[in-house]
Image: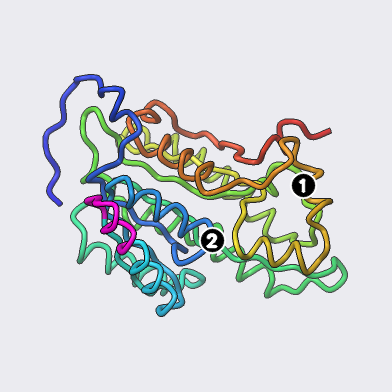
Amino acid sequence: MKTSTGSDARPAYDTLFAVSGRTAVVTGGSRGIGAMIARGLVLDGAHVVITSRKGDQCRATAEAINAEADSVGTAGSCSAVVSDLSSAEGVARLVVWLAEHLERIDILVNNAGATWGAPLEEFPLAGWTKVLNTNLIAPFYLVQGTLPLLRNAVLPDRPARVINIGSVDALIAPQWDNYSYSASKAGLHMATRHLAKRLASDGITVNAIAPGPIRTDMLGHIAADAGVEADLLERVPLGRYGNSDDLIGTVRFLASSAGSYLTGTVIPLDGGMSGCAG
């Protein structure tokens, strides 16, 4: 995965959104939003490393993505690494693995996350420490630890990319009792802006996506169990869940030549929830 010398030529329109041949890392990539992102990048020809604390699930997702990639003839590939990012030790181990196995990281997607729900009067300290460690502290230290690999990916006309997965719950007050989750994602949004300012001179862009309700197995389970699906969709002006195309389209924009002049931005991928609130 050696880097090559870039050029000042403007990208052709048919490759403007392409990420073929790039090396990407997607944390929390074994299911849900992370698996959607990994699949989309691989099908466009990227080489993607996904991480998860559940080894069997992570490997199964990588195998399924590779099987689909083979069936459509793309050059992309997916590999799995077991990693628990809820602790500093887990982040450090992942950083070491990446340094030993990769020469560069073109795209780092900080997606791994945790949530905790409890009534205000009963919300425990553990619900803060676990969520903040996973959602806010781990992404910061993963960026810090992979800086040499991100810098190795930088070309004169192609920055390396960090994409943090935030949440609409950090843009508008949530309807759930998930206090630490919304606060951690708001912190991640600000860390995105701060890191973007610091790393711009290194040729690294840092942006965030703040998803609203994206159709995943997890969301369907929550909505069905709570009987709140109709109420949830009433809060979405477009009246539907987001899907994998919505998500990967936004990721590819940020990761490709099309998004190379954007940094320090939080994109609300929420069907209008935050922009039309009030």
The residue most toward the right is 121
On the question of residue 246 being in view, the answer is: yes
Q: x, y (%) of residue 266?
A: 56, 37
Q: x, y (%) of residue 224?
A: 76, 65
Highlighted range, magenta: 66-76
Taking depth in this image into account, of 276 and 135 the one nearest to the observer is 276
- Residue drawn 39% across and 73% down? 60
On the question of residue 148 being in view, the answer is: no
- Residue drawn 20% across and 66% down? 100
- Left/right of residue 273 with respect to residue 207 in the rendered view: right
Instruction: Indicate whether 8 appears above or below 108.
Output: above
The residue under label 2 is which amino acid type?
Gly
Taking depth in this image into account, of 183 and 83 the one nearest to the observer is 83
- Left/right of residue 165 with respect to residue 59 in the rendered view: right
Instruction: Indicate whether 34 appears above or below 258.
Output: below
On the rendered image, what quadrant is the C terminus found in? top right
* Residue marked by disc 2: 32
Q: Secondary structure at mark 2?
A: helix
The residue under label 1 is which amino acid type?
Leu
Q: CA distance from mark 2 to mark 1?
A: 19 Å
Marks 2 and 1, the one that precedes in the sequence: 2
- Residue drawn 34% across and 47% down? 107
* Residue marked by disc 1: 233
Q: x, y (%) of residue 88?
A: 45, 70
Query: Does the segment drawn in magenta span residue 172?
Result: no
Dominant secondary-structure state across the stretch colored magenta: helix
